[in-house]
Image (cartoon, coloured by chain):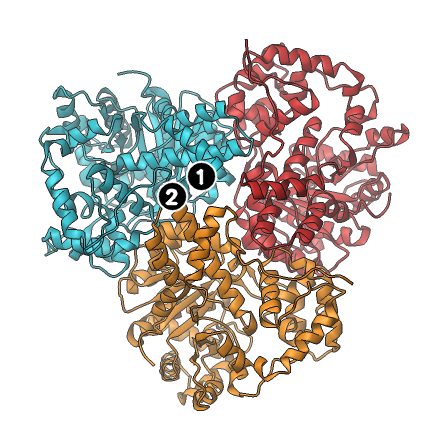
Chain colours: A cyan, B orange, C red
């Protein structure tokens, strides 16, 4: 059968006006081959700890672990079991990965015009050399091709890491993590810069399902018996020092709301004791998280770790899916956010201190121009993270540029985060950002708002320098 | 006098770049002549029950019943009385329709750049053959022309229905409606597909002005004495079955908020009894509506009626206008909406069930990308309705496409609703949607995001297939 | 050294498509030289009271008083002291204005793509004839040039006022102001139309730091002892009459929220007495402001002063900066706003009265399409002010046009406000608005939404007529 040739438009994502395309091409060319700085993401470090690790089958690589993919198929009535997503009770799920791939291919039209469709297309074409459009008819031939590639040494994680020209890759790791995979990477003699990030949510959020186990684990790895709030704080400090020794330059914190508040030590202690007894309330958890954000800011002022704050996701919105499949299954839904009042206590205490770098991420685009750009355009400590999660798309990036930059200034932003667990999608994601950046700057050039000289500085800032500087990758190692 | 010739730009609403116009023209051409699917609207079925029905005068057709038109004139200080809008007390209003038309024409500049202006212009030119721009000077000549046309058989409602190439038209009808006009249409032998929609708001919202009368009417038409909550539910089930027998495939529900919650039967009964005694509070009404949304979802799972939910309008904001002229007089104002938490009870109970189709409409565009697209991109039962009311415009459609599609996928949306009571505006409204769709898709094509093959599928989906499928017009009759 | 020639693109801010540029140029040309109507702003009238007044040094003109400028430098860690911003305690700050200018120039890249960058660039080139791009290297030469110009009679405030072709300039003045500078201007024989605006916030907001002093001043200037709520209202009425006699056509009111409510006279009196005793609570202040908005609307119905309402700024967000430098130091941050419910009491009482003109300004763009456009498109008294403060930018204006006009109609808006205290930036700000307006209208023309004839009317409305009419500058003097 005669299938259309699958190809990438070399001018993709640029405004179509010929004069604009010329400028955009030139700006993009200046950064297309710059190394990738990936300062926040969720790639599993295990992939790189063993130099012979592989990605498994095409379905294991591209579908089963990727909630961006299977949540879309689920939304059209396809059970997660049919896509091979493992059940928490170990119940039966589809094990024929060719059948999973077939279902995915037959429904690939769902991804028309979505960032997931854009990333997958570019990944299949550029990383795996696929030349036929993915459909139900071409599915098995493409499966064969990817499977064959994945069996080659050139498609092992470390080989792709080198091919992708990644200068720094960061992972996101629990406060209780021993970082053994990072240790193995560092001891292996392989010259890749892969760094952990300290994410203590599972011990900070008192309502986490396994909170008590997590606190026990914290006692064990820190060597500090976490029987009190004071000990808890000391154990966290010990872990931060360990992460920093292992190369971390940043921490990461997620919360439903941006609420920050300083509790009296006695109240912090009382809440912590209630939590240890399994009696913490929702209000306790809310206030304790808000308080710990102040504590983490204080620690960052002291130890210099960059503080990331991801705000606004209601986790596990779909109880049935959570019960059957666990967390991170495509049913985290954003809610409205508020920063002006919620961040005020923290910013009034630490926001004027240039030793702090606080990078805030939002899922509520209404806060870009209204709250976050004005805040970032004033407080020395505050920077604004790139468009996050659902907004990490061509339109999402355009809205971000248009709403943030006029008030915050480019120089109070921090470049790009790919934020992905799908390692082979990293080049496609950074490419989208670089092209979207070039397109935005082109709009400024052709409207006479910035000149070409400035635009050339700005595109390098967006693609490379801002992230490297904000996350302090230029400072040491 | 020499008046400018009034004409429609054949490339109207398309981006002006020549390369884009070429693509847009081609995509639009593929759907320009497809039949109209109108799955939600407010046309009076009486117009079609009598084959000799007419539209009245030009003012009766285009001004007096159209709150989009007279609210704009009112906003500039023109009393509604001067526009012939009837007072609830029967007090005097302008009866000279030529004078009403003159005022309208002299103020037609108010509609520059508004969707109402766009619809009216296209309607006057295409339906009525007007060739001079509407101004104070041309007003009476144009009135003559429309009046003359309206007197012709070819301009009776049924004739226009056929000329407009409408495949399905739905009306919106109270739960207590006997659907006599629909019956007459069906029995007349005229082969038009006109279907009712079950809208029970007037008996569900306990604070509706004439709630007790409505409940009495419900008892009467259902043959079930609605003296208890249980009987109320049974009467509603009886009516749904009746509507379904009359061709309905959908229900419609409107509320200020998207709040849903399951009440204990005893609480539902207690509230209902208070309402029967005229003692229901605002909080009672709020909780009862939230509960009934759960009940309607359960009924839809059972009987298969598609469930529409229109959220966010504060009705009758202007007390003076409401008192003097009644409801639907252009003073319904949107308020901020919240879906992530409010819909959670309903979605956790029924959202994973593919037998349910729940179509949600919002007046708060901030919820598109933040809440509704992520929800629709996950829950199998949830679909997102097209831009509604104030957002049913070229910019409103563009914002909808840009904010919704990347996350939700086109295939979790349902095409277009014209939602109008102004029957002769229907072709103009669908044409605007089809052109806006073509323009959006063109943007994807010229930026290399979808290929032309996919774009051709998507434009047919947008213009025709999605609505037909979502509202189950392809299933029977 | 060879520095790039600094120049302004004659087609700046227009969409780059050649066909669009042709239309935009033509529309812009129709208004480029129209006189400036400046109906709301913060220029100090003292500048014009003395015909020999000067602007001081370049740093005194462009940096030290402009919080748009120094807040951006502060956000990157530059202390306000180093920029010469005076401390409230009189503590030491940089006094070498050339050094301040040097720091500013070295950091001018922070303003890339910002409206402040756009205004400053145009001002330096067009007002001061600068021809080299501002950088660290060119800083001192440019300082020399500006300093030399400022010493010339042609660069005195009155001379620039005439050169700028300003038809009306309004200032914003406390209710207790004696308007002595306005008196001197009027008595000087200079034929400029400079009018005060009545802004009573400092006596209305009971929590203003120096509220008691302000009330004492009110007693003194009005000759009415403000010992009761009744006397307070009478004193305000006296002041309004005085302002009106001095040429004022408008009042201005700012509040964190748009809340309006009518208090019983006894409650208003009770709150006022608590305030006089220094015992007013936050809730007292909130309710009193909400009440006073009703009172001011009543007064406006009676005396015809246009009522402006600026909603949504959280003032002095950064306590450290406020304590050290006082108010208006770039740390006012917007918060979410609500109008549909908050304005309802006022609109239900006075909104149907065409004698009232209420112009509302928002910092929450989510309210444009959702609340304000529908409200302005219905209530005769309500008009929508132009994009304000953080949104007074090219993108901010485009969002405003796109979200407001389709629903509200152009004719329920009021043209442009420059809202600035930076007098020499006024032409650049109005030019940006006129170009953004031309660009918006061009989009309508090339998409076939309005014809060229209508667009020519609309551009004159936007640039000149709407402001003049809304603020009643066409009525008298």
Q: Is residue C234 left or right of residue B70?
A: right
Q: Is residue B69 above or below residue C452?
A: below
The Cα–Cα distance between marks 1 and 2, rounded to whole angstroms, is 9 Å
Local SS, label 1 = helix
Residue B349 visible, this angle: yes
Residue C148 placement (x, y as % from top left): 72, 12
Residue B287 visible, this angle: no
Q: Which mark is residue A400?
A: 1
Hey, which quadrant is residue B141 in on the image? Answer: bottom right
Local SS, label 2 = helix
The disc, 1 or 2, on the residue closer to the chain's N-terminal end is 2
Question: For the view shown, which residue lies furthest in the front direction?
Answer: A2
Q: Is residue A123 left or right of residue B334?
A: left
Q: Residues within 10 Å of mark 2 (few under 14, many from 20)?
A: many
- Chain containing mark 2: A
Residue B39 placement (x, y as % from top left): 43, 71
Q: Residue at x 26, y 65 (%)?
A: B353
Q: Is residue B264 above or below residue A161?
A: below
Q: Which mark is residue A391?
A: 2
- Chain containing mark 1: A
Is there a contact, CB below 8 Å, between mark 1 and mark 2?
Answer: yes
Q: Nearer the viewer, residue C239 or A408?
A: A408
Q: Is residue B145 above or below residue C371?
A: below
Q: Which mark is residue A139?
A: none
Hey, which quadrant is residue C317 in on the image? Answer: top right
Hey, which quadrant is residue C193 in on the image? Answer: top right
């Amino acid at each position: 059968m005669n299938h259309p040739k699958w190809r990438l438009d070399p001018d993709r994502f640029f405004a179509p006006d010929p004069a604009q395309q010329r400028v955009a091409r030139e700006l993009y060319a200046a950064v297309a081959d710059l190394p990738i700085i990936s300062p926040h993401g969720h790639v599993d470090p295990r992939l790189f700890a063993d130099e012979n690790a592989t990605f498994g089958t095409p379905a294991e690589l591209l579908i089963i672990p990727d909630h961006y993919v299977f949540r879309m198929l689920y939304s059209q009535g396809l059970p997660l079991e049919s896509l091979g997503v493992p059940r928490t009770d170990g119940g039966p799920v589809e094990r024929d990965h060719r059948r999973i791939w077939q279902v995915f291919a037959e429904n690939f039209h769902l991804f028309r015009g979505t960032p997931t469709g854009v990333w997958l297309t570019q990944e299949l074409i550029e990383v795996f050399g696929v030349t036929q459009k993915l459909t139900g008819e071409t599915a098995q031939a493409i499966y064969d091709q990817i499977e064959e590639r994945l069996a080659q040494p050139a498609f092992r994680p470390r080989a792709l890491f080198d091919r992708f020209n990644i200068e720094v890759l960061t992972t996101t790791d629990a406060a209780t993590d021993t970082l053994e995979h990072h240790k193995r990477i560092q001891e292996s003699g392989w010259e890749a810069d892969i760094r952990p990030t300290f994410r203590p949510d599972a011990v900070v959020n008192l309502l986490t399902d396994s909170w008590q186990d997590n606190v026990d684990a914290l006692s064990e790895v820190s060597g500090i018996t976490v029987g009190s709030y004071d000990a808890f704080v000391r154990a966290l400090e010990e872990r931060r020092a360990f992460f920093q020794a292992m190369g971390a330059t940043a921490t990461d914190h997620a919360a439903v709301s941006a609420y920050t508040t300083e509790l009296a030590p006695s109240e912090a202690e009382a809440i912590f004791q209630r939590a240890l007894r399994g009696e913490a309330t929702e209000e306790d958890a809310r206030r304790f998280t808000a308080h710990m954000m102040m504590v983490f800011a204080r620690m960052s002022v002291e130890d210099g770790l960059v503080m990331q704050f991801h705000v606004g996701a209601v986790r596990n919105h779909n109880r049935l899916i959570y019960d059957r499949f666990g967390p991170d299954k495509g049913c985290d839904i954003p809610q409205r956010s508020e920063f002006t009042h919620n961040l005020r206590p923290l910013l009034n205490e630490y926001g004027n201190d240039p030793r702090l770098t606080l990078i805030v991420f939002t899922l509520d685009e209404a806060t870009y121009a209204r709250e976050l750009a004005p805040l970032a355009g004033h407080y020395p400590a505050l920077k604004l993270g790139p468009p996050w999660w659902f907004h990490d798309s061509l339109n999402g990036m355009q809205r971000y540029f248009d709403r943030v930059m006029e008030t915050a200034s480019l120089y109070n932003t921090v470049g790009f985060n790919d934020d992905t667990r799908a390692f082979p999608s990293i080049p496609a994601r950074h490419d989208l950002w670089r092209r979207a950046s070039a397109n935005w700057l082109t709009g400024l050039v052709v409207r006479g708002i910035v000149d070409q000289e400035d635009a050339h500085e700005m595109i390098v800032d967006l693609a490379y320098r801002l992230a490297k500087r904000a996350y302090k990758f230029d400072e040491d190692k």
